[in-house]
Image: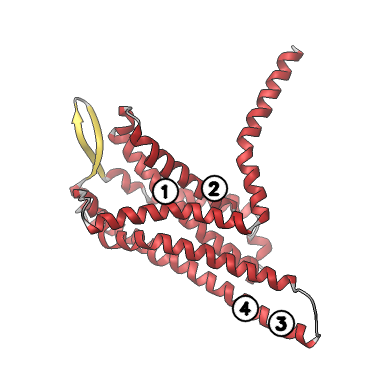
Amino acid sequence: MMTMAVADFTVIFINVILYELLMYRLSNKFLFSTNFLTVMIYQLAITLEFSLWSTVAFTVDRYVAMCCPKLQPKYCRVKTLIILAPIILILLCVENIPLLFLFEPLQIIGSISLGVRPSLDVLSSPMFSTFIKLKSIQCLFIAFGLIFLFNGLTVRHILLVSKARRAFRSQRSADGRDMEMESRRKSIILLISVSGSFTLLWLPASVTYFITGYNVYVNRDYTSPAFIALQVGSLLTNLSSCTNTSIYAATQSKFREELKTLLKFPWSFIVNLVKKKSNQNNSS
């Protein structure tokens, strides 16, 4: 859950704050150089996809924790996270390398290349077309399919166990609140809320990207329905990073404490460093 929160925060910081809000309001030529923009777009794709696959990993983790007690001690632990998160990130970095060769300078002033636009030669190549289709299938069918599959299995398991527990309690005429049932009910609500909001916000961009690919960026017709749909879809995918963290913060008290600790850590580190430096100066 914390890995997913970090991935979502990275999307908010890099994709929204740096790229959408700050970069186009700064006048430094370096920020609009072709090489910098190419690397920036490459980074945007990686952060978004890391958020996507972090959600998939969270879904699998919840399934194992609730439905696979024998596998839980081996899978649901910090060591697995330390290994799995870098592997996902490295695979995404390797997978998106073709994006570094997609763009060409929008204009050349002297010896400085400024702006980017998709290269028609690269877009028309069979290899890049296959790359675009595979990425679309990966997002639209594999990622969403895994989320629906494991969420369905988890909810089915919880409902079956809850039904058996209600029957057992009715036979024993148990009174009072069943805390275990309430915990399972909250788990179902959390899963449906996270997966439902994530799917609804990612689906428009995924469907539009599957149909149009990068071809819609060639002419950049701002009145084109396809371009408008892709821009709205991009907005919604960035918004999904905010909604996920909000859902966790609203439903999980332990997550709220962990998130506070994570946000306070940089400032606490700086304060402790300043205090340590001050004590060293005083002692000397």
Between residues 118 and 79, which one lies in front from this camera angle? 118
Mark before the other along the chain sequence, 3 or 2 = 2
Mark before the other along the chain sequence, 4 or 2 = 2
Relative placement, left or right, of 209 versus 202 is left
Q: Residue at x 68, y 54 (%)?
A: 254
Dot 4 amino acid type: Leu
Quadrant in the picture for the C terminus: top right
Q: How is the image coloured?
A: secondary structure
For this orientation, the residue located farthest to the top is 284
Question: Which residue position is annotated with label 4?
Answer: 159
Mark before the other along the chain sequence, 4 or 1 = 1
* Separation of marks 4 and 3 at Cα, in angstroms: 10 Å
**Label 1 CA crowd tier, 10 Å (few <14, some 14–19, many 20+):** many
Mark before the other along the chain sequence, 3 or 1 = 1
Q: Is residue 168 above or below residue 71?
A: below
Question: Which residue position is annotated with label 2?
Answer: 6
Mark before the other along the chain sequence, 2 or 1 = 2
* Separation of marks 2 and 1 at Cα, in angstroms: 14 Å
Dot 3 amino acid type: Arg
Q: Secondary structure at mark 1?
A: helix
Question: Which residue position is annotated with label 3?
Answer: 166
Q: Residue at x 20, y 50 (%)?
A: 221
